[in-house]
Amino acid sequence: MKKIFGAKKDKGPPPSIQDATERINKRGETVDEKIKKLDEELARYKEQIRKTRPGPSQEAIKARAIRLLKHKRMYEEQRNMLYNQTYNLDQVAFAADGLKDAQQTMNAMKAANKELKGMMKTVKIDEIDNMQDEMTDLMDVSNEIQETLGRSYNIPDDVDEEELMGELDALESDMEFESAAVPSYLQPESDFDADLNLPAAPTCPAAVPAGGLQVPFAKSMLNIIVTE
């Protein structure tokens, strides 16, 4: 029976979006090459029409140019159609990639959720609370130990503050009396000139007149010397 009707051929996997896109792009490149060649021919016909005088020859060239223009429009429509197909395939590919990313995200979240559940089973809230209570008790005991070790000796607890202030005042009075009893030669030197308020000494001698001392003034000075 297989020899008569032939065996059923196994169908291969369907083409992917990428394969279909590449195939359409190749077709589009072929159409672009055809349009480019038509443009070159039309440019030649345009030059011939410009150089040819009006008449049957020019009309024949125009007819061929019009035929090429029709072919060019047909290829342009095909190229636009291929562009639309490529755009649709790109949209489908984008949507498919988005779904794949969403699926991978869900798988990652499921794995993380499962791992968290396994970790939560090993952590117990009651044990954490008990540990916190024990840590608080240990800190309290440690503070009591530190306070006990830092306690001073031979200091009475019932000290009267007013009595201490009286002793402080008496100590200040004793210190003032001792400072007053210091001998004068041990006390710091004072500025005698400032205490006596004496005028300052001249910095340079007074100038003598050019003619020397006058006679009356000289005589008076000699009388004073003799008298002394």
Image (tube, rainbow, N blue to C red):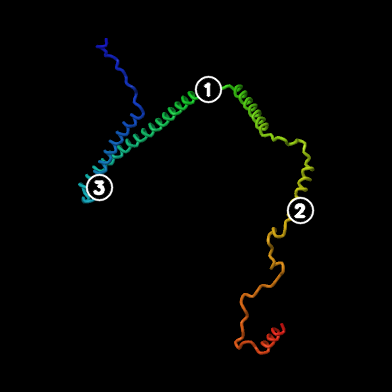
Query: Is residue 95 toward the left or the right of residue 130 in the image?
Result: left
Task: Kindly identify which residue carries mark 3.
Answer: 46
Give the label, 1 or 2, closer to the camera: 2
Residue furthest out toward the top: 1
Residue furthest out toward the left: 57
Task: Kindly identify which residue carries mark 2.
Answer: 177
Q: Residue at x 75, y 35 (%)?
A: 157
Q: Amino acid type of disc 3?
A: Lys
On the rendered image, what quadrant is the N terminus found in? top left
Q: Residue at x 71, y 67 (%)?
A: 195
Point out residue 33 in the picture as x, y percentages from the top left corner.
27, 38
Q: Amino acid type of disc 1?
A: Met
Q: Amino acid type of disc 2?
A: Phe
Q: Relative to residue 19, is residue 64 depicted above or below?
A: below
Query: Is residue 107 toward the left or the right of residue 37 in the image?
Result: right
Task: Kindly identify which residue carries mark 1.
Answer: 119
Q: Secondary structure at mark 1?
A: helix
Which of 135/219 is in front?
A: 219
Query: Is residue 134 toward the left or the right of residue 179 in the image?
Result: left
Q: How many marks?
A: 3
Among the 4 quarters of the image, the one containing residue 180: bottom right
